[in-house]
Image: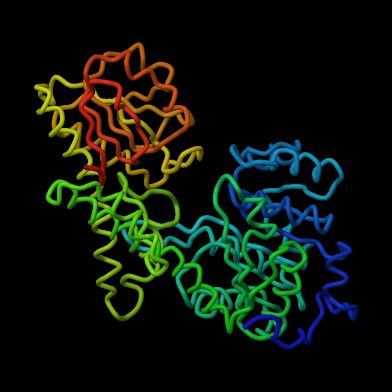
Amino acid sequence: MSETVPEAPYPPHGDERTFPWAFGLGEYQVAVYGLGKMGLPLAAVFAEATGDVVGVDVDEGVVAAVEAGESHVAGEPGLDELVSRTVERGALRATTDGERAAASACIHVVMVPTLVTDGEPELGALDAAIDDVAAGLQPGDAVFVECTVPPRTCVDRLQPALVAKSGLDPDEFGLAFCPERTMSGRAIEDIRGSYPKVVGGVDPASTELARRVYREINDAGVHAVTDATTAEAVKVFEGLYRDVNIALANELAQFADAFGIDVTEAIETANTQPFCDIHTPGAGVGGHCIPYYPHFVMGQFEPDAPLLRTARAVNDRMPAFVAERLLDELHAVGTSPEDATVAVLGLTYRPGVAEVRATPAKPLAARLADAGVTVLGVDPLVDHVPGFPHEVLDPYELSDRDIEGAVLVTAHDEFDDLDWAAFDRLAVVDGRQALDLADTDHRVYTVGGD
């Protein structure tokens, strides 16, 4: 459903003017709660469009940086300039006082982390943001939730909380789920319109408010779905599809030795048929999205979701599978694990993105260490990973170290410049089909390769 919901029956703060025109002129202040690597680009894009945005974050350092016109988010093209420009003209400011921001804003956009702890969704940051919003919520305000949540969160959790804590009736304010559909490294481009913006409200009026607001910043248009729960499911389904598809690719990759073929070649060729779209196998699935979203469904609802559980198990096993292949390769070149120093290349979950949440490098390194290997982490973007009890080097430092093996976990561009010929014969596992070592005498195993 798109562009077919009825007009909103209530204007913000009782103003009788047409809402979208007033929004376009910057008549209403926008508060964005959460200035992380997706929240800050969103706040800056809103600021450019409206001229009046306050960003809220619990991190005083983040707030201080934004107030100084600086972006704390690295690797986002155009973000530094956009933050500097909007702050300089007074269109964007930041605060740690969420309640005060809520009191002055009419449009509240929530973009805080929603994580998983011990297999259970952790929505504490979302609850805290909603408490702040409720403290300043006024009749006619609109609340838009962008962070990923389990389906039914808006209707079963957020709307009752807003009603109870604000004292307003449900029909006195708008509430819609409007999922972020962005990737690190292209956040501004995606927010402005790489894809249509999905919106779904707890009622038709909320959906219409969301449609009118987001069409002002998204050039690809707005796709309005039936309700907030449908919109929540859309976002979760996007991640579940990828997790299951990657699990299929990873399981197929493990047949490479038995088949005696390059499974990746077979996958790529199969994908030339338009009804096939198998993803690429690899050393594991990390980040703050794909490994978490299945837990927003599994155990939260009936049925039991056996396919999702199996896919998670397959992907969770990949770091150990890759570690075992490296141990095999060490034995093949006559090196015992206890005598081996191995470079784990790539600690972030994606190339070019300084994010280590759920990185497959940690369990992979743990398996190697359990076998007696001395592990060196190597990454151009981070020099520390919580819970990674091994030395971390920059790639340029690796040439000064004696190593017996290497495993590629994340294909950073900087690894293309490594002088592989400078090392004595190594046991190497390529976990991303990204290394070209044909002109060396290193023993190389490629995940999914022949």
Q: Residue at x 46, y 39 (%)?
A: 351
Q: Residue at x 37, y 43 (%)?
A: 359
Q: Residue at x 78, y 53 (%)?
A: 47
Residue 401 picture location, percent across and down: 31, 13
Between residues 110 and 401, which one lies in front from this camera angle? 401
* Count of numbered marks: 0
Residue 88, image quadrant: top right
Residue 445 picture location, percent across and down: 22, 36
Between residues 186 and 211, which one lies in front from this camera angle? 186
Q: How was the colour assigned to the protein in this rendering?
A: rainbow
Q: Quadrant of the C terminus?
A: top left
Is residue 291 rendered to the left or right of residue 447? right
Residue 119, image quadrant: bottom left
Residue 15 picture location, percent across and down: 88, 77
Tell me: residue 172, above or below residue 340.
below
Between residues 142 and 273, which one lies in front from this camera angle? 273
Is residue 221 rendered to the left or right of residue 226? right
Q: Quadrant of the N terminus?
A: bottom right
Residue 241 picture location, percent across and down: 40, 66
Tell me: residue 401, above or below residue 370.
above
Is residue 291 rendered to the left or right of residue 157? left
Q: Residue at x 34, y 41 (%)?
A: 432
Residue 431, image quadrant: top left
